[in-house]
C-alpha cells in the first residue's frame, strides 16, 4: 500500500502538485489492479489532495471515472464526472440496484478493450465526501454505471471479469 503523508509545512497547492506528479496510470496486468483496497480511516488533507489530484488526472485522460488503485493507491476512493458534477467518495457502497442492462464499457487501465457489462441502471451510492461527511445520492444511467465500474476497481474486479473482451482500436474510455 502506498500512503500519502501529510506535509504540514508544504503549502497545499505544492502538495497537490507533488501528489499529481506521483500518480501513474496502472495498466492491466499490473497487480495493483487486483488488490483488495483498504477503507479510508479518516478523510484528511491527504485524502482530499488525492481526490483533487485524481480529478485532474481523470480530466487530463478524458475519462469519466477513476479509482485509486488505477493510480497506484490501495484505498477505497473513487471519483466520477459524467458531466453532471463531480462525485468524489471514500468508502463508497451501493444499494438498491434496479433494472439491469447490458452496455459496452471501456477502461483507462485496459486500453483498446471493451466488454459488454451487465449493470444496474439505477443505484443508491453512499460514502464519505471530500469533507468526510456521509452523503447518499441516487445515480442513474451512465452515472450509475460508472459508480459500479469504479467500485469494482476497489474490489480488484475488472471489466474482463464480466465478459469476453472485444478488441478495438478506438479510445472510448470510461475510466
Ligand atoms: Zn476502469
Image (tube, helix red, strand yellow):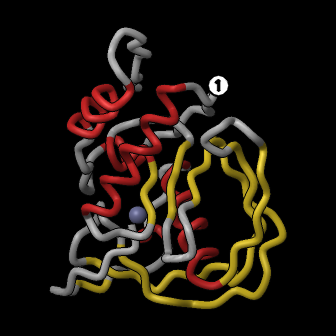
Q: Quadrant of residue 120?
A: bottom right
Closer-to-camera residue (110/59):
59
What residue is at 69 percent from the left and 80 percent from the top? 140
Q: SS at mark 1? A: loop
Residue 111 appears left or right of 107:
left
Quadrant (top left/top right/bottom left/bottom right) for the N terminus: top left
Q: In this picture, is 9 found above or below 100? A: above
Residue that label 1 marks: 42
Q: In this picture, is 48 found above or below 144? A: above
**Ligand 1 position by quadrant:** bottom left
What residue is at 49 percent from the left and 68 percent from the top? 81
Task: Tell me where residue 46 appears, x and y as whole percent.
Answer: 47, 26
The crowd level at tag 1 (other Cα within 10 Å; few <14, some 14-19, many 20+) is: few
Closer-to-camera residue (44/123):
44
Q: In this picture, is 25 found above or below 58? A: above
Q: In this picture, is 143 found above or below 17? A: below
Residue 169 appears left or right of 110:
left
Amino acid at each position: 500500500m502506498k500512503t500519502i503523508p501529510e506535509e504540514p509545512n508544504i503549502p497545499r497547492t505544492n502538495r497537490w502538485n507533488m501528489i499529481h506528479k506521483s500518480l501513474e496510470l496502472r495498466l492491466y496486468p499490473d497487480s495493483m489492479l487486483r488488490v483488495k483496497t483498504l477503507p479510508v480511516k479518516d478523510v484528511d488533507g491527504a485524502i482530499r489532495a488525492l481526490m483533487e489530484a485524481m480529478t485532474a488526472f481523470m480530466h487530463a485522460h478524458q475519462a469519466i471515472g477513476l479509482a485509486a488503485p488505477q493510480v497506484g493507491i490501495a484505498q477505497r476512493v473513487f471519483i466520477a464526472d459524467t458531466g453532471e458534477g463531480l462525485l468524489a467518495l471514500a468508502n463508497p457502497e451501493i444499494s438498491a440496484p434496479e433494472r439491469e442492462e447490458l452496455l459496452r464499457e471501456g477502461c483507462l487501465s485496459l486500453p483498446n478493450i471493451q466488454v459488454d457489462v451487465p449493470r444496474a441502471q439505477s443505484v443508491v451510492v453512499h460514502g464519505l465526501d471530500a469533507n468526510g461527511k456521509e452523503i447518499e445520492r441516487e445515480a442513474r444511467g451512465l452515472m450509475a454505471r460508472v459508480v459500479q465500474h469504479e467500485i469494482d476497481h476497489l474490489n480488484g474486479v475488472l471489466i474482463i471479469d464480466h465478459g469476453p473482451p472485444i478488441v478495438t482500436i478506438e479510445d472510448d474510455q470510461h475510466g
